[in-house]
Image (spheres, rainbow, N blue to C red):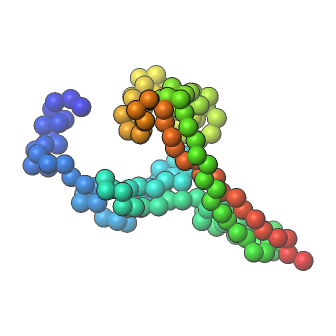
């Protein structure tokens, strides 16, 4: 961060960091999470620095809501169940994690590839700074997919 920006932040916060929930209200935090979820096409959860959930913009509610807008789905489906399936994922290192973003397939990679090289390098560096890595450099994350089960109405 340039020193002038750091000075401005220090002046605004009296030299101490400010927590997101101290700056904006809960409804705005939830709107922020939803806007990221809509932009990237993935569920987004925002946590404070202590791990407390601030906002949850998960997708199954949206998926179920979307199915409910389809006339044929409303008439033809019963007992829609949505279940999260968590899959442990392990990457050998950051480059292993970052490589799929360069393929442009899916919302997040498409966004990354829409950036010019300088902005994409900034994004990559910001993610590298924030993603939790093990001592050996490997990265362990949990991928979540949503399974939907329903029956056809008779």
For this rendering, which residue is in front, 99 or 135? 135
Give percent across and percent down for residue 60: 61, 62
Location of the C terminus (image quadrant): bottom right
- Residue in view at x 58 percent, y 35 percent: 110
Image vertical order of residue 148 relative to residue 145, above or below: below
Outermost residue toward the bottom in this view: 154
For this orientation, the residue located farthest to the front is: 135
Where in the figure is residue 104, as x and y percent of width and height?
61, 31
Instruction: Name which quarter of the figure residue 31 lies in.
Output: bottom left
Q: Is residue 71 visible from the viewing direction of this image?
A: no
Q: Is residue 111 left or right of residue 33?
A: right
Quadrant location of residue 122?
top left
Image quarter hosting the N terminus: top left
Q: Position of residue 130 (x, y in %)?
A: 38, 38
Q: Please state if 92 lies on the left or on the right of 87 as rendered.
A: left
The residue that appears at 36% across and 34% down in the rendered structure is: 129
| Picture layout, residue 47 above or below residue 91 | below
Tell me if I can see residue 131 in this picture.
yes
| Nearer to us in this view, 62 or 84 | 84
In-image side of 20 versus 138 (left or right): left
Of residues 117 and 94, the one nearer the viewer is 94
Whether residue 13 is situated above or below residue 121 in the rendered picture:
below
- Residue at image position (43%, 36%) is 134
Q: Judge from the rendering whether residue 3 lies leftward or rightward of residue 36; answer left or right.
A: left
How many dots with numbers?
0
User: Residue at image x 52%, y 44%?
Assistant: 141
Residue 135 at x, y percent in the picture: 40, 32
């Amino acid at each position: 961060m340039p020193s002038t920006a750091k000075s401005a932040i220090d002046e605004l916060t009296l030299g101490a960091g400010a927590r997101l929930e101290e700056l904006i209200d809960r409804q705005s935090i939830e709107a922020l999470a939803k806007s990221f979820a809509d932009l990237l096409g993935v569920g987004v959860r925002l946590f404070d620095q202590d791990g407390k959930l601030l906002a949850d913009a998960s997708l199954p509610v949206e998926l179920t809501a979307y199915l409910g807008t389809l006339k044929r789905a409303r008439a033809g489906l019963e007992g829609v169940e949505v279940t999260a399936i968590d899959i442990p994922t392990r990457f050998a290192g950051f480059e292993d994690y970052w490589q799929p973003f360069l393929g442009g397939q899916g919302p997040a990679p498409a966004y990354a590839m829409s950036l010019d090289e300088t902005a994409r390098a900034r994004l990559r560096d910001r993610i590298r700074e924030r993603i939790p890595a093990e001592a050996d450099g490997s990265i362990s994350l949990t991928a979540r997919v949503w399974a939907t089960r329903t029956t056809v109405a008779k």
